[in-house]
């Protein structure tokens, strides 16, 4: 959707449309992160869904950053992806919390949305959290850019490299290397192995 489309909407419809548009795009970004994790370690859609419901957004990003850090061999690609993923939490995670958890009204004297956001540390203080239409569109474009970078990420992460790094850590007295990551039986994912669950649904 473009700026003209939103500006044609009357308030308060425009405010609700902007908030909904942002939250939908954030949900798509979060889904892309989880899907990339799932593709990387061979999870089923059902397993991805279960994990998604029990892992906080920042932790999902941390998992993916760890996989990139260990499993991507190209240093330039790795650096670019790690920077982008760090920005996801620092930038979009904080904004999403404000937009999802605070009431809002149409911007007074403007075309956007004002949120009733507060900071509560040593004392309670209101935050000036107002986004014009252009800000919503800018943030959605940034999230879309990250999502596009994730499209081919799973194929760039090498599970063999991750296993090799775990073996190296094990030889240094770390997690036990191949004891932690034994060879995978045919048709089994790392998720199955680590949780002791076979494809037939029976635990070891």
Image (spheres, rainbow, N blue to C red):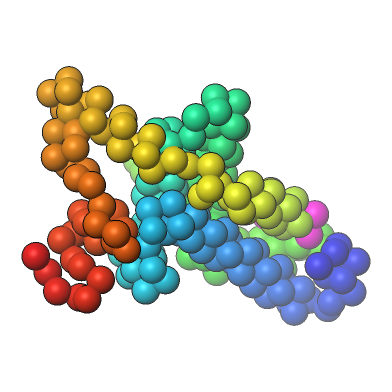
**Residue 165 image-quadrant placement:** top left
Estimate the x, y position of residue 181 in percent, counting from the top left: 21, 43
In the displayed structure, 91 sits above or below 136; it is above
| Quadrant position of the C terminus in the picture | bottom left
Residue for point 38% across, 35% down: 161
Is residue 93 shown left or right of residue 41? right
On the picture, is 196 further left or further right than 51?
left
Task: Give the image quarter of residue 192.
Answer: bottom left
Judging depth in this view, the residue of 78 and 103 nearest the camera is: 78
The answer to whether 3 appears left or right of 44 in the picture is right
Q: Residue at x 44, y 40 (%)?
A: 158
Say which of 131 and 17 sits in front.
17
Q: Residue 11 lies in what quarter of the image? A: bottom right
Residue 130, x across and y down, in percent: 67, 55
Q: Which residues are magenta?
A: 130-134
Query: Which residue: 25% across, 25% down?
Result: 168
Q: Nearer the viewer, residue 116 or 181?
A: 181
Q: Position of residue 159 (x, y in %)?
A: 38, 43
The answer to if 131 sits in the magenta stretch is yes
Q: Quadrant of the N terminus?
A: bottom right
Of all residues, the one furthest to the top in this rendering is 172
Residue 65 on image: x %, y %? 44, 40
What residue is rendered at 46% in x and 57% in y? 39
């Amino acid at each position: 959707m473009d700026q003209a489309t939103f500006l044609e909407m009357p308030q308060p419809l425009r405010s609700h449309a902007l908030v909904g548009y942002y939250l939908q795009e954030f949900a798509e970004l979060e889904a892309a992160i989880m899907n990339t994790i799932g593709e990387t370690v061979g999870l089923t859609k059902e397993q991805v869904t279960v994990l998604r419901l029990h892992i906080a957004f920042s932790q999902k990003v941390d998992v993916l950053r760890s996989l990139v850090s260990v499993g991507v061999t190209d240093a330039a690609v790795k650096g670019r992806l790690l920077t982008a993923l760090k920005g996801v939490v620092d930038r979009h995670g904080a904004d999403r919390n404000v937009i999802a958890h605070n009431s809002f009204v149409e911007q007074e004297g403007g075309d956007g949305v004002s949120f009733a956001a507060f900071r509560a540390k040593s004392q309670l203080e209101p935050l000036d959290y107002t986004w014009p239409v252009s800000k919503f569109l800018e943030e959605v474009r940034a999230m879309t850019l990250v999502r596009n970078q994730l499209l081919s990420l799973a194929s760039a992460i090498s599970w063999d490299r991750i296993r090799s790094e775990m073996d190296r850590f094990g030889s240094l007295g770390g997690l036990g290397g191949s004891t932690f990551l034994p060879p995978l039986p045919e048709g089994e994912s790392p998720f199955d192995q680590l949780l002791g669950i076979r494809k037939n649904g029976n635990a070891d």
